Structures are given as C-alpha cells and as structure tokens.
Image (cartoon, rainbow, N blue to C red):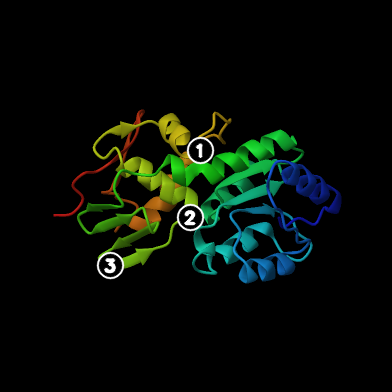
Amino acid sequence: MIEDDQRLAGMVVTYLGQNGYEVAHAGTAAAGLAALEASAPALVLLDLMLPDADGLDVCRRIRALGAPLASVPIVMLTAKGDPFDRVVGLELGADDYLPKPFEPRELLARLRAVLRRPQLAAPDTDLRQFGRLLIDSGARRVSIDGQARTLTSYQFDLLLALSGSAGRVLSREHLIDAVKGESLEPFDRSIDVHIGRLRQAIEDDPRQPKRIITVRGAGYVFAKVQDA
C-alpha cells in the first residue's frame, strides 16, 4: 500500500490483516517503488495524491518496471471526484479504483475480486492462437509474430474472456462480470477504456481494429479469423 495518510493506512493494514492479508505500507512514492523492486506483491494499493509524486506517474513507472510488476494488479485510491482522473488511471494500467472515503468492506470485496481474476478466467487449454496472435494463459503472455506485448492483469483477463468466446458478441455487462467476478458497481464505460488499451497492445492499427470489433449497441466480438 502506497499511501501518505498514516491514519487511513493503519486502518487498512489492520482490517486487511484481520481478513488474512499481509500488507506492507509505504508513505511515499519513492519508498513504495523501492519496496516493489525488492519484492513483488500480489497487488498494489496506490493513492492518487502522494507528497513526492503524482499517483498516475507512479502507476506508469510500475508498469515500466518489467515482469512481474508489469502485470501486477493495481487498485488506485483517490479523493478526487473527477471521472477524468479515473479514466486516466485506467488508461495508464490501473485495474480498478476506489474513491475516498470508502467502506473497508468494499475495499476488501474489490481486492478479492481483482485477486480472483486469473482463476475465474482460466481457459481449458494454455495456448490459443489466432493468426499471428498467440495467447499463453499458463505463462500469462501475449505475443504477435513472436514479439511479446505488455498487458495489465485486468487487460489479460479481459483478452481471455473475449478470446474464449471468439466469434460471439459479448456485452459490456458480460465482460465486466467475467473479469471482475463480483457484482460491484463499475465505473461507467470503464470497460471501453480497457478495450482501447488492449487494442493499443494487440491491433496493427487500433483505429481500425480487426481483432476486437465493436458491435454498435451490443458490445464487442473477438474475431476468429484475424489475419489473411
């Protein structure tokens, strides 16, 4: 947990500890990044406003650290009410967000949902190939023409959900349920942000996608045939 509010951090550490989670706390971005490089956690709780750095910049830097931190789930904590900040956080690689003040039970539910995603999205086989695109669920790797593409944990699970139903139109609600694993209230249209980032990673031209196709008024379909 990277959070400068000592009182809030203490409450979270105690509450999550009572529910079986071991939480390490850092009060600054510098201390948090140093701790992450020393030992990769199962999940990062990241405050948007830190005394020595912007949380959005910290999120970007975590994603640039390479495996395994490039795909570690990040849940952002924000006191800001502006939806723009939340969208930017999702675009930079955050998997979920929680506005302050929040109920500890909601935080726990969101963390459980994020941490369950790999099990919920596990496919029947480890490898799925669609033309030049190869998805290795066992190693949680995606490559095109042998070149690895970096995805967040949320984006990888979203890709598994889409590719597992290739050729079928999936609604936004279906995708949110499949990836979140909880009936939590999602940020309006947040799935579109993740789809956009996923397209940036796997499409030859994200502006004219051929792998993840938008079906107006219905949702998205993952194309079975993607390359000539």
Of residue 69 and residue 202, the one placed in the foreground of this image is 69
Whole-percent x, y for residue 54 in the image: 69, 60
Whole-percent x, y for residue 204 in the image: 29, 59
Write the residue at 26% across / 40% down: 166
**Mark 1 closeness class: few <14, some 14–19, many ≥20 residues within 10 Å:** many
Kindly identify which residue carries mark 3: 146
Whole-percent x, y for residue 157 in the image: 43, 46
- Residue 171 seen anywhere in this rendered image of the structure: yes
Q: Is residue 29 left or right of residue 143?
A: right
Mark seen at residue 152: 2
Instruction: Tell me the element at label 1.
Output: helix
**Looking at the figure, which quarter contains the N terminus?**
bottom right
Q: Earlier in the sequence, mark 2 or mark 3?
A: 3
From what the image shows, is residue 49 above or below residue 29?
above
Instruction: Tell me the element at label 3.
Output: loop
Kindly identify which residue carries mark 1: 180
Instruction: Tell me the element at label 2.
Output: loop
Write the residue at 76% across / 66% down: 52
Question: How many dots with numbers?
Answer: 3
Write the residue at 76% across / 64% down: 28
Q: Is residue 155 left or right of residue 96?
A: left
Type of the residue with mark 1: Lys
Q: Is residue 134 left or right of residue 151?
A: left
Type of the residue with mark 3: Gly
Write the residue at 68% across / 35% down: 106
Using the numbered discs, state the Cα–Cα distance from disc 2 to disc 1 in whole angstroms.
14 Å
Q: Earlier in the sequence, mark 2 or mark 1?
A: 2
Q: Earlier in the sequence, mark 1 or mark 3?
A: 3
Using the numbered discs, state the Cα–Cα distance from disc 1 to disc 3 in whole angstroms.
29 Å
Type of the residue with mark 2: Thr
- Residue 193 seen anywhere in this rendered image of the structure: no
Q: Quadrant of residue 216?
A: top left
